[in-house]
Amino acid sequence: MSSDIAYVAFCMDDGPHWWSWMLHPEIKHCYVVIPHDGQWLALGKSTEGIELMIVDNITDVVENDILIKSKVTKPKRGLFMLNTCVGYTKQVLGINKPFIWTPYQLYRYLEKQNVG
């Protein structure tokens, strides 16, 4: 990765899934946006698989989403990782907090870290 800073985007759109009722009404999905060589890489996990988008302008990806700046550390492989948008985002950022399961919990954690 060319940057030690990334942005985590939080949004309401997670599609019609059976687990949606358990999630926070305003934060149901998350993904990582990383600056790379003058462009932006948006990396996310959905029910269809891993999603990757490369754009020139960050607003093409995160038009109505909440962005939080985060430090990227060396990823640590734990014994267990949820195969969700949160698990994938934590792995990309190197966050080793096993009890952060929902996008809202990750949002609160990153908000407290307050990278600036």
Image (cartoon, rainbow, N blue to C red):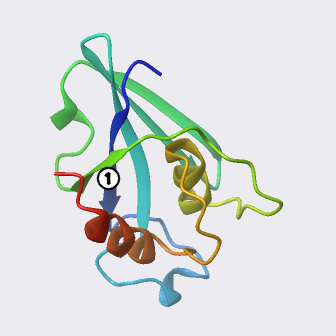
**Residue tagged by mark 1?**
9
**How many other residues sit within 10 Å of disc 1, few (<14), some (14-19) or many (≥20)?**
many
| Residue plotted at (39% across, 76% down) | 104
Residue ID at (51%, 75%): 102
Residue 42 falls left or right of residue 61: right
Which is nearer the eye, 56 or 86? Answer: 86
Quarter of the view holding residue 66: bottom left
- Report the amino acid beneath label 1: Ala
Q: Position of residue 70 (x, y in %)?
A: 33, 49
Residue 105, image quadrant: bottom left
Q: Is residue 9 left or right of residue 90?
A: left
Image position of 41 with respect to 106: above or below: above
Q: How many numbered marks does the figure carry?
A: 1
The residue lying furthest to the right in this view is 79
The spot of residue 77 in percent (x, y) is 74, 48
- Residue beneath the point at 23% across and 61% down: 114
Q: Looking at this rendering, what residue extends furthest in the top direction?
A: 37
Q: Residue at x 33, y 68 (%)?
A: 12
Residue 110 position, x and y percent, is: 34, 64
Instruction: Single out the residue that lies furthest toward the bottom.
Output: 22
In the rendered structure, the answer to whether residue 64 lies left or right of residue 111 reads left
Rendered location of residue 61, percent (x, y): 27, 38
> What is the secondary structure assignment of the residue under circle 1?
strand
